[in-house]
Image (cartoon, rainbow, N blue to C red):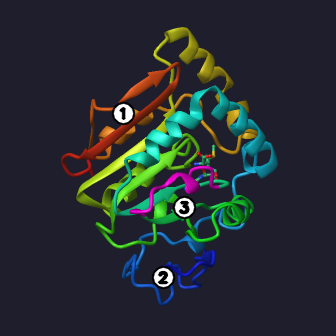
């Protein structure tokens, strides 16, 4: 159904090319507001420990043993129809999707994409960033992200793109770590954030991602919502239009 190649968006004009040459399943947008090629960090993907696939996979294996695996299963278990996974990394969710899901995953880091390709040879993988999703408005029934919006340089813009590409009755499903509710722990997160961000591939431990999701025009649903320490999982539906 999809072209199985990793497609790189490198249009010299600054407009992203179609994500799926010849593939009708996820129609390409007429244009993308800011293209991959226009971003200053285009050829220098975020660097840090979490961008080294071997290290990242080892770390994830431990986290998954301690419960993250169950949360990943919940995350993808609710995906329906045309589904976009944003920031798929090394593709640790990709094998968990059910047969009824038509999946496309985006990720800016080519090293992570290469590992994801080996892990999920049949999934359409697209090199793109959350802030400039190369898909038309309302292309997806479900958008999924796990542990991504702490690292997206412009999370508000990325969430606006998610809002744009999701159908009006679609669902955003997320597993993310967020700013602590404890004042002292949050202060600690603020303190370590610059060093953390530097060595952890752009990750911000103190992001208020749930508030950012609501600001983008989503309503978080109580069903399935969980918190564990600074970890959150939830699904959200489109509410009002995103704030300008
Ligand atoms: C902690 S990893 C999570 C990977 C994967 N989602 C998982 O659950 O294992 C964060 C990922 O977000 C990606 N990322 C960083 N900035 C991004 C952006 N602007 N758009 C999309 N993904 C981004 C990174 O390249 C990295 O693969």
Cβ(mark 2) to ligand 1 < 8 Å?
Answer: no
Which image quadrant for residue 224?
Answer: top left
Residue lying farthest to the left in this orientation: 240
Give the residue at mark 3. Answer: 129
Count of labels shown?
Answer: 3
Indicate which disc, 1 or 2, sits on the residue closer to the N terminus: 2
Q: Is residue 93 magenta?
A: yes
Indicate which disc, 2 or 3, sits on the residue closer to the N terminus: 2
- Element type at marker 2? loop
Instruction: Please determine whether, in this image, residue 200 is positioned above or below residue 65.
Output: below
Residue lying farthest to the right in this orientation: 54
Which image quadrant for residue 201?
Answer: top right
Q: Residue at x 49, y 57 (%)?
A: 85
Q: Which residues are the magenta region?
A: 91-101
* Front position in the image: 36 or 23: 23
- Element type at marker 1? helix
Instruction: Please determine whether, in this image, residue 132 is positioned above or below residue 30.
Output: above
- Percent coordinates x, y for residue 161 in the rendering: 39, 59
Give the residue at mark 1. Answer: 211
Q: Is residue 111 left or right of residue 141?
A: right
Residue lying farthest to the front in this orientation: 99
Give the residue at mark 2. Answer: 18
Q: Residue at x 55, y 81 (%)?
A: 3
């Amino acid at each position: 159904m999809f072209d199985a190649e990793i497609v790189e968006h490198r249009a010299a004009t600054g407009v992203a090319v179609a994500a799926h040459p010849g593939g009708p399943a996820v129609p390409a947008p007429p244009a993308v507001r800011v293209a991959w090629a226009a971003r200053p960090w285009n050829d220098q993907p975020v660097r840090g420990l979490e961008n080294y696939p071997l290290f990242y996979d080892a770390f994830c294996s431990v986290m998954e043993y301690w419960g993250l695996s169950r949360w990943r299963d919940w995350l993808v278990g609710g995906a329906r129809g045309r589904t976009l996974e944003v920031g798929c990394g090394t593709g640790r969710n990709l094998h968990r999707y059910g047969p009824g899901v038509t999946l496309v995953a985006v990720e800016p880091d080519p090293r992570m994409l290469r590992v994801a390709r080996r892990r999920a040879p049949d999934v359409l993988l697209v090199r793109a960033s959350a802030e400039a999703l190369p898909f038309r408005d309302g292309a997806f029934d479900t958008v999924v992200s796990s542990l991504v919006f702490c690292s997206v340089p412009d999370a508000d813009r990325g969430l606006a793109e998610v809002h744009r590409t999701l159908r009006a009755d679609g669902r955003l499903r997320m597993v993310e770590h967020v700013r602590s509710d404890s004042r002292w722990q949050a202060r600690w997160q603020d303190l370590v954030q610059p060093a953390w961000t530097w060595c952890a591939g752009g990750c911000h431990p103190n992001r208020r991602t749930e508030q950012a999701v609501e600001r983008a025009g989503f309503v978080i649903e109580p069903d399935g919502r969980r918190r564990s320490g600074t970890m959150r999982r939830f699904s959200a539906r489109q509410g009002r239009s995103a704030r300008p």
